[in-house]
Image: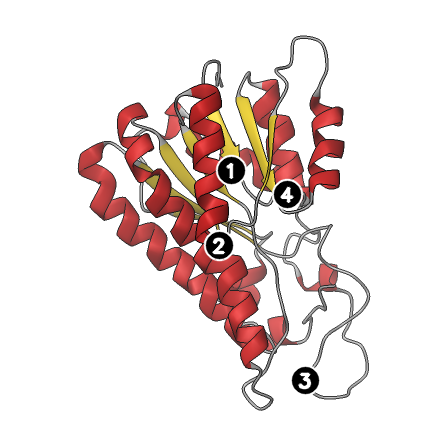
Amino acid sequence: MDFSNKVVIITGANSALAAATATLLSSYGAQLILVSSNPAEIKELSDELVKPHVKTPLLITADVTKEEGAKRVERETVNHFGKVDVVVNAAGGMVPDCIQKPDLKAFDENINLNLRSVYLMTTIFARHLMRSRGNIVNIGSVFVDTIFSGHVTYNIAKAGIEYLTKTSALELANKGIRVNCVKPGFTETNVTPKMHKCEDKKPWEDATRMVPLGKLINGRDIAEAIVFLASEQAKNITGTSIIIDGGLALSGTTVIDKIRTAFD
């Protein structure tokens, strides 16, 4: 794949998923804009990416859950490069909550981190992507397809991303903009021995034993799907979600419920 002369924004660039995506895109010649609210972590990622014949990324410290943060990304990107070809919406997070223990703070955090940020970046950058006939790749979750209890508003937010993807794809298709989604299952970086539960019970068994292919997903697996959807090889794909979960969704809700995981 060739991303030479392509300008790619990656939000949530302090995450392992975004780092894997940035590394892969960089190897294909992309000019990257790494966005995070944590300047130290994106600087560390940038230092790792900078090698001979690799373009130095533009680092932007911004909170894209806020309109001003997303507009700062727009200003600095356009001022520096004059265009945008791809937006990868990888910013997100998970705050556990349950219907039986309502938590409006968790609701707001999950919606802001996972859905509001994607909405802002989509609406703000649509006009720039019209000029470049570019595309957007959003990060959803397999737990839209198989319910993950104990994380009710995270599920709501990720379902919102899927429908935002489809609606945006339909509305922007006649402008030449493609919008797609990648939905990971459990990954090597987000599954830990610590389990979150709404009830006090013994720890659930190891998540890998519940995955039909017998292994967790790694960042490179997800990055490859993101890069494919962002590339010219996917020029006729829009409004689509690709699940990368090792078959986890096939296990059903009961099994998924046994491996609910805590996220720090």
Q: Is residue 180 left or right of residue 225?
A: left
Q: Are marks 3 and 4 in contact (CB under 8 Å)?
A: no
Image: 150 above or below 13:
below
At 70% across and 80% down in the image, what residue appears? 197
Question: Mark 3 — residue?
Answer: 198
Q: Which mark is residue 17?
A: 4
Question: Mark 2 — residue?
Answer: 66
Q: Are marks 1 and 2 in contact (CB under 8 Å)?
A: no
Q: Amino acid at mark 2?
A: Lys
Q: Nearer the viewer, residue 60 or 140?
A: 60
The picture quadrant where one finds residue 36 is top right
Question: Mark 1 — residue?
Answer: 225
Foreground disc of the pair 4, 2 = 2
- What distance separates the C-alpha of mark 2 from that of mark 3? 30 Å
Foreground disc of the pair 3, 1 = 3
Tell me the element at label 3: loop
Dot placed on the residue nearer the N-terminal end, 4 or 2: 4
Q: Amino acid at mark 3?
A: Cys
Q: Amino acid at mark 4?
A: Leu
Image: 250 above or below 76:
below
- What distance separates the C-alpha of mark 1 from that of mark 4? 11 Å
